[in-house]
Image (tube, rainbow, N blue to C red):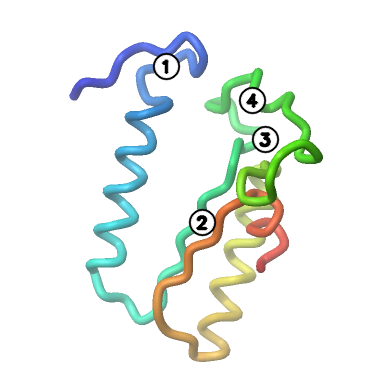
Amino acid sequence: ENAKWSFITKSAAGGGWYNHVKGVAERLTVEAGMPYTYIAQPGTLWGSPHSPRIATMIPNAILPMKYSSANVADIANGMVMKTVSAFQEDRTGVETISGGIPISEGK
């Protein structure tokens, strides 16, 4: 709707609009009432053509863990490990985790 072109993301879908859409998707997912919901909030997605190039150059060593970044494939693998583990252990509820490193490690 009001998405504006971003010089940094080179698209109209970055920044505030992305955060808005992700927030709405997270809220609707929680409202769906699934027995277990895992919400992942990584920093920059390394290896994604949609990540601002400058953001991919910031080393994790200078960032708090919750803002850390990781490779897209590693994040996907960690999310799958975490979700499979939750269902095998019959966990319920909503779990939110921030940071590419913790997500990629399946924490």
Label of residue 33 in the image: none
- Sequence-wise first label, 4 or 1: 1
State the separation of the CA atoms marked 1 and 2: 23 Å
Q: Real-space Cα distance between discs 4 and 1?
A: 15 Å
Residue 77 location, x and y as percent?
A: 66, 59
CA separation in Å, label 2 and label 4: 19 Å
Name the residue carrying label 1.
11
Residue 42 versus residue 26 in the image, above or below: above
Mark 2: few/some/many CA within 10 Å (<14, 14-19, 20+): many
Tell me how far mark 3 sits from mark 4, CA to CA: 9 Å
Of callouts 3 and 4, the N-terminal one: 3
Camera-near label (3 vs 4) is: 4
Tell whether label 4 touches label 3 (CB within 8 Å): no
Tell me whether circle 1 and circle 2 mark residues in contact (CB < 8 Å): no
Query: From what the image shows, is residue 87 above or below residue 62?
Result: below
Which type of secondary structure does the marked residue at label 4 adopt? helix
What's the amino acid at mark 2?
Ala
Disc 1 residue type (three-letter) = Ser
Q: Residues within 10 Å of mark 1 (few under 14, many from 20)?
A: some
The kind of secondary structure element at disc 1 is: loop
From the image, tell me which residue sits under label 2. Answer: 40
Q: Which residue is mark 3?
A: 46
Q: Are marks 3 and 2 in contact (CB under 8 Å)?
A: no
For the residue labelled by badge 3, is the local secondary structure a helix, a strand or a loop?
strand
For disc 3, the neighbor class at 10 Å (few under 14, some 14 to 19, many from 20) is many
Residue extending farthest to the bottom is 90
Q: Judge from the rendering whether residue 96 lies leftward or rightward of residue 85; answer left or right.
A: left
Q: Residue at x 31, y 76 (%)?
A: 34
Quadrant hosting residue 19: top left
Q: Position of residue 91 (x, y in %)?
A: 49, 86
Sequence order check: which comes first, mark 1 or mark 2? 1
